[in-house]
Image (cartoon, rainbow, N blue to C red):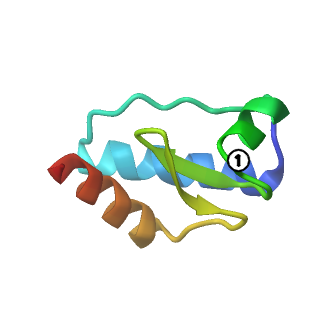
Amino acid sequence: MGCPKCRATEKLVLEVIRERGIDAEITKVTDIAEIIGFGVMMTPAVAIDGKVKVSGRIPSKKEIEDLLVESNKA
């Protein structure tokens, strides 16, 4: 389910989590109302701890790594 860009983004996020050994709960949101509730107008999007960090494009693997590492410091 989901667009090719969304699937690619999900794959990258899962890859980074696995490679870095990050303990994270991943939820793929497909309900349009819930997506809009996050303020996302274009997918794919990546939210961490309920805050949208990337929207409307596929983030790079490095960007995902940086976002996840930074969120784990907090």
Q: Which of 22 and 41 is in front in this view?
A: 41
Q: On the image, which quarter does residue 63 sit in?
A: bottom left
Q: On the image, which quarter does residue 67 sit in?
A: bottom left
Q: Which of 45 and 61 is in front in this view?
A: 45
**Image position of 35 with respect to 71: above or below:** above
Give the secondary structure at mark 1. helix
Q: Outermost residue toward the left?
A: 73
Percent of width and height locating residue 69: 25, 56
Which residue has dot 1 on it? 7
**Residue 52 in the figure: left or right of residue 28:** left
Percent of width and height locating residue 15: 44, 49
Residue at 55% from the left image edge and 29% from the top image edge: 27
> In the rendered image, which quarter contains the N terminus?
top right
**Residue 70 in the figure: left or right of residue 48:** left
**Residue 46 in the figure: left or right of residue 43:** left
Percent of width and height locating residue 20: 26, 50
Amino acid type, callout 1: Arg
Residue at 79% from the left image edge and 28% from the top image edge: 31
Q: Which of 33 and 14 is in front in this view?
A: 33
Residue at 71% from the left image edge and 55% from the top image edge: 44
